[in-house]
């Protein structure tokens, strides 16, 4: 194998490790929140969107793939769009690449922002690292795992709002709270499919703590609560409350799933991955309507 081929294979694994299917899930909240709060397509918007599109995801998922290597080897879900089993020889390179790609963007956003936006950005990056890094391993602390995971996806929007110094209003708080609840529900349901494997490996999660069926029901209730909270954001923003319905319907068939059949929840998780772009499109249309009214 030539050096060029080796470098190309390493690059492909690094990109795959960053979960391209999930890039939009972090870049979109930043870009949309920045524009919706009154910001324009300026340098800060471009840098922030690019950062939360790729480097942020390489840091989030790359660190996870390095420190979850042993469990990933036994996880049948790995090897496709849901993540790779990162070659052990690339672990150091992945950590270096994550640092090298993140630091310039972080420094730029710090210089372009304020103390408030820098503080939120620091919380965001800490949550990403703490989720998977040794000793911290928030992903193995039931409930804290869901809270931390949700922070990964909500914090880019909060960073954007802090950068444009958006005023704190009741509708804004309701929107962020609903988004956060949605994130917690999504993480909890995602953990259901790994209950048996995690227990076998001695790993903890909200799903190993509650069990598969109770976790699914908790996720359904949390999605519903997110919808209720979103309604309080007023008209027409409250229409976004309807977006939780497909998620509830999608996971409802697993509400009585026994732990020993937890892998069956994978079908619901794959639906979740494709529901997100549809929901993002719907939110975009709603933002356009709000901007025109």
Image (cartoon, rainbow, N blue to C red):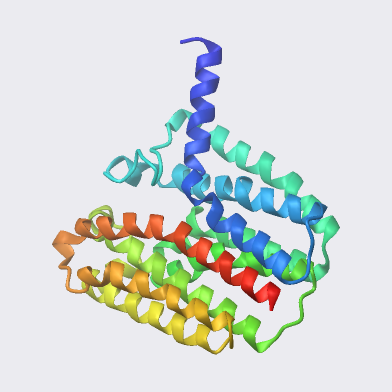
Name the quarter where the C terminus is drawn. Answer: bottom right
Residue 30: horizontal and vertical position, in percent?
A: 65, 61
Nearest the eye: 250 or 199? 250
Q: Nearer the viewer, residue 284 or 126?
A: 284
Do we see residue 25 in this rendering? yes
Residue 24 horizontal/vertical position (percent): 55, 53
Q: Judge whether 57 appears above or below 95 on screen.
A: below
Q: In this view, does 47 lie to the left or right of 225?
A: right
User: Does residue 19 show up?
Assistant: no
In the rendered view, tell whether residue 129 sits above or below residue 54: below
Going 33% across and 66% down the picture, which residue do you hit?
A: 189
Q: In the rendered image, which quarter is residue 207 located in?
A: bottom left
Is 211 on the left-hand or right-hand side of 87?
left
| Total tally of numbered discs in the picture | 0
* Image coords of residue 276 (percent x, y): 45, 60
Q: Which of 63 and 257 is in front in this view?
A: 257
* Residue beneath the point at 39% across and 79% down: 222
Where is residue 262 drawn, in percent x and y?
20, 61
Residue drawn at the location 56% of the way across and 45% of the way down: 58
Residue at 44% across / 67% down in the picture?
145
Compared to 39, does 101 lie above or below? above
Q: Quadrant of residue 234?
A: bottom right
């Amino acid at each position: 194998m030539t050096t060029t081929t080796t470098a190309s294979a390493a690059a492909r694994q690094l990109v795959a490790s960053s979960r391209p299917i999930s890039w939009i899930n972090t870049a979109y909240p930043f870009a949309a929140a920045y524009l919706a709060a009154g910001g324009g397509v300026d340098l800060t918007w471009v840098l922030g969107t690019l950062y939360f599109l790729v480097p942020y995801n390489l840091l989030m998922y790359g660190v996870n793939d390095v420190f979850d290597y042993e469990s990933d080897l036994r996880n049948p879900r790995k090897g496709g769009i849901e993540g790779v089993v990162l070659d052990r020889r690339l672990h150091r390179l992945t950590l270096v690449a994550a640092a090298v790609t993140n630091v310039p963007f972080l420094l730029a956003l710090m210089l372009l922002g304020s103390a408030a936006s820098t503080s939120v950005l620091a919380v965001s990056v800490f949550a990403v690292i703490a989720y998977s890094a040794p000793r911290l391993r928030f992903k193995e602390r039931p409930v804290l795992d869901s809270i931390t995971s949700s922070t990964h996806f909500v914090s880019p929007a909060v960073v954007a709002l802090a950068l444009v110094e958006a005023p704190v209003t009741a509708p804004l708080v309701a929107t962020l709270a609903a988004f956060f609840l949605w994130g917690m529900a999504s993480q909890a349901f995602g953990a259901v499919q790994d209950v048996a494997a995690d227990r076998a490996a001695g790993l903890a999660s909200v799903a190993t703590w509650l069990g598969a069926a109770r976790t699914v029901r908790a996720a359904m209730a949390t999605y519903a609560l997110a919808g209720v909270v979103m309604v309080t954001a007023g008209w027409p923003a409250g229409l976004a409350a309807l977006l939780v319905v497909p998620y509830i319907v999608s996971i409802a068939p697993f509400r009585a799933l026994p732990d020993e059949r937890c892998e069956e929840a994978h079908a619901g998780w794959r639906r979740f991955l494709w529901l997100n772009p549809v929901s993002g499109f719907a939110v975009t249309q709603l933002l356009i309507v709000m901007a025109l009214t």
